[in-house]
Image (cartoon, rainbow, N blue to C red):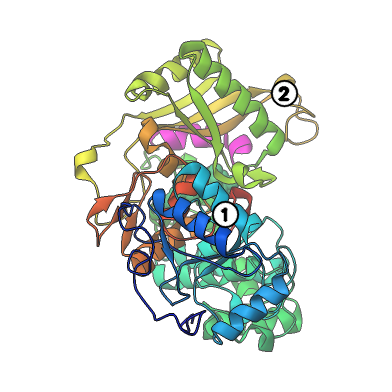
Amino acid sequence: MFQSAVAPRARKRSRPAEAGVSRCNEVKFEDVRVFLVERKMGRSRRSFLTQLATSKGFIVENVLSDKVTHVVSEDSQAASLWKWLRECAPADPPGVHVLDISWFTDSMREGKPVAVETRHLIQDAVATPPEGSKPASMATVSQYACQRRTTTENSNKKITDAFEVLAENYEFNEMDGSCLAFRRAASVLKSLPMAVRSLRETQDLPCLGEHTKAVMEEVLRCGRSFEVEKLLSDERYQTFKLFTSVFGVGPKTADKWYRGGLRSFSEVLADRSIHLNQMQQIGFLHYGDISGVVSKAEARSLRNIIDEAARATTPAAKVALTGGFCREKEFGHDVDFIVTTPELGGEETLLPKIIDELKKQGMLLYCDYHPSTFDINKLPSPKFEAMDHYAKCFLILRLEGSRVEGGLHIAEGDNRGWRAVRVDLVSPPVDRYAFALLGWSGSRQFERDLRRFARAKRGMLLDNHALYDKNKKEFLAASTEKDIFAHLGLEYIEPWQRNA
Ligand code: DCT
Ligand code: MG
C-alpha cells in the first residue's frame, strides 16, 4: 500500500488545502485524490498542474499516501517509474491507478475525472503485462467480471462448455446457487488469455470450487467430463433443452409438460389439455427460424431497418445496437436495440411509431409491447429486478434476404428468400440512456458482477435506471457508459471486452 511519504520531510496530511494548495477552490470530486509525480515533470510544472486541477474542483495530494487514488506521471519509462513507486511503497497498491499524463489532460478538458482506459495506464512490466498478453500470474484475476477484460476469444472452450451444460441443468432444476457457481467459474476461465493445462495452474484463480475443479480435472485429463456426458444423454435434460428452445417456454412450463409425460413437440401439439399462449404459438410457427442463430450481417441489416423506421417517424431518434452484437459476437439468439430521442418525453411515443412503421412495411410477424412503468420517484430500487421499467417490445420480424449482405443465415436449400428474427427494442428517456445502454450491453455475468461490485465495494446501487450512492444518499448522473465506470472507480471496459 502507498503509505510512505515521497519527500521524507513532508508530513502526511489529509487534504491538499492543508498541504499548501489553495483553499478557496471548492472540492467537487471527493472520491478522487490525485498525486502528481514530480520526477520528469519538474517542480514548476507540477505546481502549475496542481493549481489547474484544484481550480477545477480536484483534490491533489502533495504526499503519496494510501488516500491517493490516481498517480499521474510524465515519466514514460514505465520500469523506472514502477521501481521508484515500489521504493516509496513496497507492497502493491490496491486499486490505485498509475496513469500517464493523458488521463490528467483528458480530465482537465472535460472538467471531471474521466474513466480510466487502457491507453491511460502505465503498465507495470512485472505485475501487469501489456494488454493482450498473458498475465504473469493468474493470481491477478479479479473475482469480479467487471474488472476483467473478456473478448469473444475463449482459450478454454472445452471446459467452459462443460460448465455451461451443468449450469443449465441446475437452472432447469431451479438450483440457483450451483448454477451461479458454474457460470462464475466459466466466466473466470473465459477471461484467461491462454488455455489452462493443469489444475495446479488454477490454484490462485477466484470462483473455482471443489465441484468445478473436479469437472475441470476430468476434462484436462480425459478430454471430456463423464458427468456432462451422462447429462447430455439424460432424458429429462434433453426434454427440457428441447422444450425451452421454443420462444415463450421457460423451465417452469417445460417442467409441467415433462411431468405430464410429454417428450416431443408432436406430443405437446397433440395434447388437447395444453393451451399455448400467443408467444408459444408463434414460437412453434417460426420454430425453425428463431431457434437458429442470427448472424452479424443480419444484425447489421436490422440496424439499418430499425434506424430507418425510427427516423421516418422521429427524425432526431437515436438507435444503438446493444446486447451480444455490440460485444462483437458473431452470432446471437436475437438482436437488441436501445432507441431514444434527444428531448425528454419524446421517447414515450417512439416505440409505437416504430412498430407502426414496421407493420406498414409488412415486416411485423409478432409484437409484444410493454409500455413504460418507469417512475423516477421509486428509485433507488432496493432489490434488483430482472426486467427494467422502460417501454420495450419483443418482436419477430420478417427479414428479406435481399437486405442482408452475403445473404441470410439459413439452411442451404431453403429458398423462401426471407427468415423470421427475434428483435428487442427498449426505449429509455434520454437522461437514463447511459444506464440502459450499459445494462443491456451484457453479458449477463458482466452485469451481475457490475451490480455486485457496486454494492459490495462502493456502497452503491446500480441498475438499468440509475446509480445511487448509499453513503452520500445521492444519485450520480451519467451521460455515457464511461461516466458510470468512473463513478464506480473502475477502469473502463469496452463492450467487446465484456463477454464474461
Ligand atoms: N440482461 C441482463 N439480465 C437479464 C436479461 C438480460 O442483464 N435477466 C442483459 C444482458 C444482455 C442483454 O440484456 C441482452 O439480453 P440477451 O439478448 O438475452 O443476451 P445477449 O448477450 O444479447 O445474448 P444473445 O447473443 O444470445 O442474444
Ligand atoms: Mg441478444
27 or 471: nearer the viewer:
27
Front position among marks 2 and 1: 1
Identify the magenta region.
277-291
Q: Based on the displayed image, in which of its 4 quarters is residue 450 positioned?
A: bottom left
283 in magenta = yes
450 above or below 222?
A: above
Cβ of mark 2 under 8 A from ligand 1: no
Q: Is residue 262 left or right of residue 378?
A: right
Q: Residue at x 40, y 67 (%)?
A: 176
Q: Based on the displayed image, in which of its 4 quarters is residue 134 positioned?
A: bottom right
Farthest residue, direction front: 44
Q: Is residue 403 left or right of residue 56?
A: right
Q: Residue at x 56, y 12 (%)?
A: 361
> CA gap, disc 2 to disc 1?
46 Å
Count of marks overlaid on the render: 2
Residue 222 screen position, x and y as percent:
75, 82
Reading the chain from its start, which is encountered first: label 2 or label 1? 1
- The secondary element bearing badge 2 is classed as helix
Identify residue type, mark 1: Trp
487 above or below 345?
A: below
448 or 22: nearer the viewer:
22
> Where is mark 1, residue-wise?
103
